[in-house]
Amino acid sequence: MSETAVTETAVSEPRSYYGQPILQEPTWTWEIPAYLFAGGLAGASAGLAYLSSVRGDQVTAKRAWTAALAGIAASPPLLISDLGRPERFYQMLRMFKVTSPMSMGSWILSVSGSTTAIAAANAWLGLFPRLSRIARPVAAVSGLALSTYTGALVTNTAVPVWHEARTTIPFVFAAGAALSAGAATTLGAAPDRVAAARHLAVGGSLAELTAHTAMKRGLGVHAEVYKQGAAQRFEQVARAGLAAGTALMLGPARRSRVAATAAGALMLTGAVATRWSIYKAGFISAADPKYVVGPQRAGIRAGERPGGARTEPRARSTPAA
């Protein structure tokens, strides 16, 4: 191969010094994908519970408040475990910065947690009757924010596959939260008493599958990471769980408590696996310079982002004899 060809190959291929990663892999551990699921479940369940209570469906409301309380109770310990020290979570509350997903998330979680606890106590024990009138709608509104702000939290990073999906991941998380709330509410319930939750689970499942497909189509070369390693395996589990759970929910789950419970469990498994697939995809894209350097150079050449475009090397002049 000629010297010019070698140089052109070096320019066109996305490479780094000694093949080392350009970005540091995320420092997040298993607590983060678990929180993405638990927070989404809690937030959407609070919204389902409030709407059900307004419609007079107290059976669905009580069960949804229980799911919301379970999700919101698990969320702070997961975040604190990831942060390493409890005081780091409290330090997030010392400021209110709308441009910081971490700051806003801490406040949303705090407001949603306190109001959800009051609403659940009132639904099951009749406590706080006056305070719950305010707590229920506040829990619903803050819960909806809780189920979607995590999309901003994930995409507000330098990790290529997350950042490039900044306009679609919030929709994936919102749909996943909705299906999780519906599926959790149907667990162990008589099918004829939780029809609204069943409809929400099916609608959320279809919406998540659609949003996830649209997200990957818009990623370009970054979508390749979902065909690799753990990201691919978790995505396969997610699609299988959602497909099987949705089929059951549309069929036998309409008449059988056992089928409804099985459908809900499968759909919850799919929702968890989707979060883990997105989480693992971030590690793959950060570790490979191909997904960092290549798209950046292509964007510079196309004039879509600022930077100095690399030009083709000039041919060396031959000294005169």
Image (cartoon, rainbow, N blue to C red):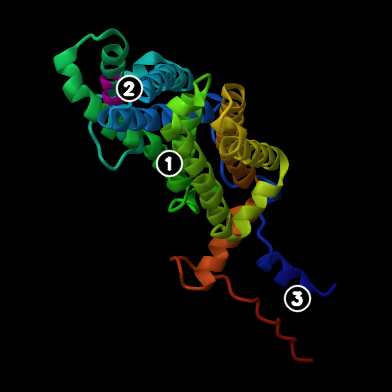
- The reply to whether callout 3 and callout 2 are in contact (CB within 8 Å) is no
**Residue 159 seen in this snapshot:** no
Question: Residue beneath label 2, please?
Answer: 58
Q: Residue at x 65, y 47 (%)?
A: 226
Q: Residue at x 50, y 68 (%)?
A: 300
Residue 157 percent across, percent down from the top left: 46, 44
Outermost residue toward the right in this view: 1
Q: Amino acid at mark 2?
A: Gln
Query: For the magenta stretch, what is the residue range?
Result: 111-115
Q: Nearer the viewer, mark 3 or mark 2?
A: 2
Q: Where's residue 223, x and y in %? A: 62, 54
Mark 2 falls on what kind of element?
Answer: helix
Q: Earlier in the sequence, mark 3 or mark 2?
A: 3
Q: Is residue 113 above or below residue 145?
A: above
Q: Would you place residue 82 above or below residue 153 in this image?
A: above
Check the picture and name the quadrant holding the N terminus: bottom right
Which label number is shown at residue 4?
A: 3
In this view, 255 is above or below 130 = below
Query: Which marked residue is nearer to the observer: mark 3 or mark 1?
Result: 1
CA–CA distance in space, label 3 to label 1: 51 Å
Seen at 39% across and 35% down, the residue is: 147
Return the mark for residue 174: 1
- The three-letter amino acid code for the residue at tag 3 is Thr
Q: Is residue 42 visible?
A: yes
Q: Which numbered disc covers residue 230?
A: none
Mark 3–mark 2 Cα distance, whole angstroms, equals 75 Å
Q: Is residue 6 left or right of residue 175?
A: right
Which of disc 1 and disc 3 is earlier in sequence?
A: 3
Task: Count residues near mark 3 (Cα–Cα under 10 Å), then give few for <14, some for 14-19, many for 20+.
Answer: some
Task: Please identify the residue farthest to the bottom as the structure is shown.
Answer: 321
Q: Nearer the viewer, residue 302 or 47?
A: 47
> Marks 2 and 1: CB-CB under 8 Å?
no
